Image (tube, rainbow, N blue to C red):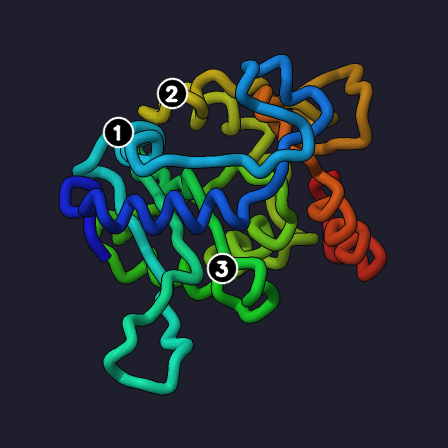
């Protein structure tokens, strides 16, 4: 489990390819970002962008990967099926551990790989003092995996803590895109115009059709409290 300075360009290339194949497609407003972001097209990533976005503070960042042997021969190289980037920083007397990217190959969804990746973070010395964890992702399964990291149930997480500290935690982050996010939902806005309780607006216009379908399943089971 390497820290940022130990992650090779070859590994980042594999992670970028996994992201580009599985993260999602651009939504209807994608054209407002740039002429290269086209609605319906896959969201692409490069190794260089991963290094700048997820490993910009290399000594306080870590990468966890999941490789699976898919061929019958031991001589065949295992393939990358999931990865998680995370960064830690101080927030007052607390230590924040933030998952900056979590991607799992669609072929192995619902096989607890996201849960395994996040649980593995606990084994790294950077996370030995972490007592606050978070992520900004549109997929409810990712949020559920993070709740498991904290030995919590996603439907019973402490909303008062989020209301009181989310703004300060994000403001103290060394990650640029987290500093720029806008908190949305009834936890943070007196007159919220959506059904969201705790969310952020990132101006990253990805299509949410599949995550919303999964969210409905969580809500039907009474397993959701964030929206």
Picture quarter with the N terminus: bottom left
Give the answer, above or below, for where 143 lies relative to 91.
below
Tell me which label, 3 or 2, sits earlier in the chain: 3
Distance between mark 3 and mark 2 Cα atoms: 24 Å
Q: Quadrant of residue 48?
A: top left
Q: Residue at x 73, y 25 (%)?
A: 28
Distance between mark 2 and mark 1 Cα atoms: 9 Å
Mark 2 residue crowding within 10 angstroms, few (<14) / some (14–19) / many (20+): few
Q: Quadrant of residue 83?
A: bottom left
Q: Which residue is mark 3?
A: 114
Tell me which label, 2 or 1, sits earlier in the chain: 1
Tag shown at residue 56: 1
Distance between mark 1 and mark 3 Cα atoms: 23 Å
Q: Residue at x 48, y 56 (%)?
A: 150
At mark 3, the secondary structure is helix
How many numbered callouts? Answer: 3
Q: Which residue is mark 2?
A: 176
Mark 3 residue crowding within 10 angstroms, few (<14) / some (14–19) / many (20+): many
Q: Residue at x 38, y 43 (%)?
A: 16
At mark 1, the secondary structure is loop
């Amino acid at each position: 489990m390497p820290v940022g300075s130990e992650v090779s360009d070859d590994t980042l290339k594999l992670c970028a390819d996994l992201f580009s194949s599985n993260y999602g497609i651009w939504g209807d407003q994608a054209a407002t970002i740039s002429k290269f972001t086209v609605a319906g097209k896959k969201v692409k990533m490069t190794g260089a962008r991963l290094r700048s976005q997820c490993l910009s503070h290399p000594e306080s960042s870590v990468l966890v990967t999941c490789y699976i042997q898919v061929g019958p021969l031991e001589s065949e190289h295992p393939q990358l099926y999931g990865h998680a980037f995370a960064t830690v920083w101080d927030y007052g007397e607390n230590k924040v551990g933030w998952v900056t990217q979590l991607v799992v190959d669609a072929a192995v969804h619902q096989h607890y790989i996201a849960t395994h990746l996040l649980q593995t973070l606990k084994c790294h010395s950077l996370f030995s003092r972490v007592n606050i964890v978070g992520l900004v992702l549109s997929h409810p399964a990712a949020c559920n995996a993070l709740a498991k990291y904290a030995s919590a149930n996603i439907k019973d997480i402490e909303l008062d803590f989020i209301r009181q500290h989310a703004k300060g935690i994000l403001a103290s982050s060394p990650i640029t895109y987290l500093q720029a996010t806008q908190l949305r939902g009834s936890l943070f806005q007196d007159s919220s115009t959506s059904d969201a309780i705790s969310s952020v607006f990132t101006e990253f216009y990805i299509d949410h059709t599949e995550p919303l379908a999964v969210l409905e399943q969580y809500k039907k089971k009474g397993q959701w409290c964030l929206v």
